[in-house]
Image (spheres, rainbow, N blue to C red):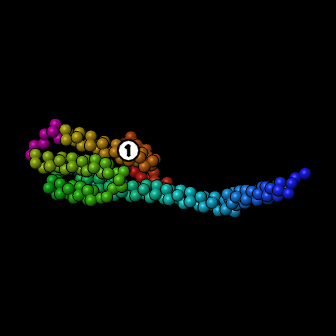
Amino acid sequence: MLTPAQQKMKQELEELQAAGRFYHVEETRSLTPQPSSMKKWIILAAVFLLGLLMAVLYLFHSNQSNLAAYLTKEQLLYRQSEQLLNQTLSGGTVDYRDVKAEQIHLWKKLSALDPPSRLQAHKLDLLHVMEQQQEILTYLQLSKDTNTAALNHKIIELQIKQGLAMESLRSALEREKINYELLEDGTVHYWVDSKVYTY
């Protein structure tokens, strides 16, 4: 049998153990997230990820659309420049001064265009092509007797620069992950928003 002091000690220990179990249960409950709280966090995380995905898709789509719009403007100027040179080389009577002035005007318009950052190198390559076209026109304007070898050399330089411009275009399309196809005639078909563009 226990003495009264031992009984009192035993009772106090039992009370402390009971209080400890109660405290442990309360502490565990507060650390375990409630099911409704977990659902809120999962829904918030899903909404955040969905919003992030939509923003990325919008930016990707916007970049491709801007790229296609720029290339359309650029191509129009370049084709006009190319047509001027081809008409001059075809041999008819031409006022070289007017043709060269128009060529310079087209070059300035292309210089003023603001390309997407991925097309900056392509724009510079195309400006070099147009400068070579101007050089050919200057040569034709200044030479009374056309030296076929010198003219052919300038035309070969032009073709090399055109090849570099086309290569930089293809590189930009690949970086933007735009599907394209290089045709035998040197033109490029590329697709943006299920629409086919030709360059």
Whether residue 15 can be seen here: yes
Percent of width and height locating residue 6: 83, 54
Whether residue 106 can be seen here: no
Question: Around disc 1, counting alpha carbons within 10 Å, would you say few (fewer than 14), some (14 to 19), or many (20 or more)?
Answer: some
Percent of width and height locating residue 107: 23, 55
Q: Please state which of residues 90 and 131 is positioned toward the viewer in this rendering.
A: 131
Please tell me which residue is depicted at 39% across the width and 55% down the height of the picture: 67
Circle count:
1
In this rendering, position of residue 42 left or right of residue 183: right
In the picture, residue 38 is in which quadrant?
bottom right
Q: Please state which of residues 76 and 51 is positioned toward the viewer in this rendering.
A: 51
Q: Residue furthest top?
A: 149
Percent of width and height locating residue 2: 87, 52
Q: Please state which of residues 20 and 56 is positioned toward the viewer in this rendering.
A: 20
Against 38, is 183 above or below? above
Please tell me which residue is depicted at 36% across the width and 55% down the height of the picture: 116
User: Which three-letter amino acid code belongs to the residue tagged 1?
Assistant: Ser
Please tell me which residue is depicted at 63% across the width and 60% down the height of the picture: 41
Q: Please state which of residues 181 and 95 is positioned toward the viewer in this rendering.
A: 181
Please tell me which residue is depicted at 17% across the width and 57% down the height of the picture: 101
- Residue carrying label 1: 171
Percent of width and height locating residue 28: 71, 56
In terms of secondary structure, where does tag 1 sit? helix
Against 112, is 85 above or below? above
Span highlighted in magenta in the image: 144-151
Q: Residue furthest left?
A: 144
